[in-house]
Every structure is written in structure tokens, then in C-alpha cells.
Image (cartoon, helix red, strand yellow):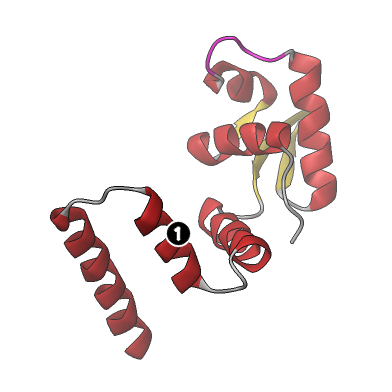
Amino acid sequence: MKELTKGEEQVMQVIWNIGQGFANEIMAAFPEPKPAYNTVLTVIKILEQKGFVKHETFCRAHRYYPAVSKEDYSHHFLGSVVERYFNNSYLDLVSAFAKKENFSIEELEDMKKAIDEAIASERK
């Protein structure tokens, strides 16, 4: 899976948030200041070429929808960051955040609980 550019990711965030939509609906979902309509259409075409977006045709209008889920992309992207910057070690990633951030005991306990739940669901 390819990585998204910043502009592509902004368009994908909107499409993921609305689930599906025609170009005017996608434009309406952008926060202000909105990008140019033609720019968004160009990015959507690129996203289709990359396999991130598909469309259904109604008369002459296209309704766009994600071909890749936000969850799948975020897992891929995080894995890529861990590989490039943290020697392919999630422990190194967590350690870097733990050293930089001042986590509260409650936040650390929540993280441990999330990890324990993930491990439990993997074992099922």
C-alpha cells in the first residue's frame, strides 16, 4: 500500500468521515478555508488511481467511497513509521513517547489495559 501525501490524506479524511459522497458533498464536508473544487477533484482522481477511492456512477455523477478503510491505512502508516524511525520496534516507539511525554498514572494504566485487551483478543 502506498502512503498518502498531505493533500491526499486531507481528502481521504473527509471521505472517511462522510463514508461516501458526490463531489459537492465532499466539498461541503471540508472545513474552512475550503480548497478549490478542481483541486479536490484532481486529488480524488489520484486517489482512485492509487486504489484508495472507488466510485459508483449515477447518470453522469460519481459517488465516491473509500476502497481502503481508515483503520487499515492507519495500521499500515504506523507500521511504516515504526519501521523507518524506530528500528521496527513498537517498544522503541512507546519508549520514545514515554520519555517525551509526561503521562499520568491513569494514562499509563489505560495504555496497559488496552494492551492487555489486545493480547486477549489475539489469543481468542
On screen, residue 106 versus residue 18, left or right, reads left
**Residue at x-position 73% and y-position 52%:** 3
Amino acid at circle 1: Ala
Residue 118 part of the magenta-drawn span: no
Q: Nearer the viewer, residue 79 or 82?
A: 82
Count all numbered tags in the image, as a single digit: 1
How would you classify the magenta stretch by its main secondary structure? loop
Residue 33 part of the magenta-drawn span: yes
Residue situated furthest bottom in the rendering: 123
Q: Position of residue 118 (x, y in %)?
A: 33, 75
On screen, residue 46 versus residue 101, left or right, reads right
On screen, residue 21 versus residue 60, left or right, reads left
Relative to 87, say whether 123 is above or below: below
Q: Nearer the viewer, residue 94 or 47?
A: 94
Q: Nearer the viewer, residue 83 or 45?
A: 83
Residue 58 visible in rendering:
yes
Q: Position of residue 20 (x, y in %)?
A: 58, 38
In the rendered image, the quadrant that contains the N terminus is bottom right
Residue range (magenta): 31-35
Q: Position of residue 30 (x, y in %)?
A: 56, 20
**Residue at x-position 52% and y-position 17%:** 31
**Within-10-Å neighbours for mark 1: few <14, some 14–19, many 20+:** few
Q: Which residue is mark 1?
A: 96
In the rendered image, the quadrant that contains the C terminus is bottom left
Q: Quadrant of residue 48?
A: top right
Residue situated furthest left in the rendering: 106
Relative to 82, say whether 67 is above or below: above
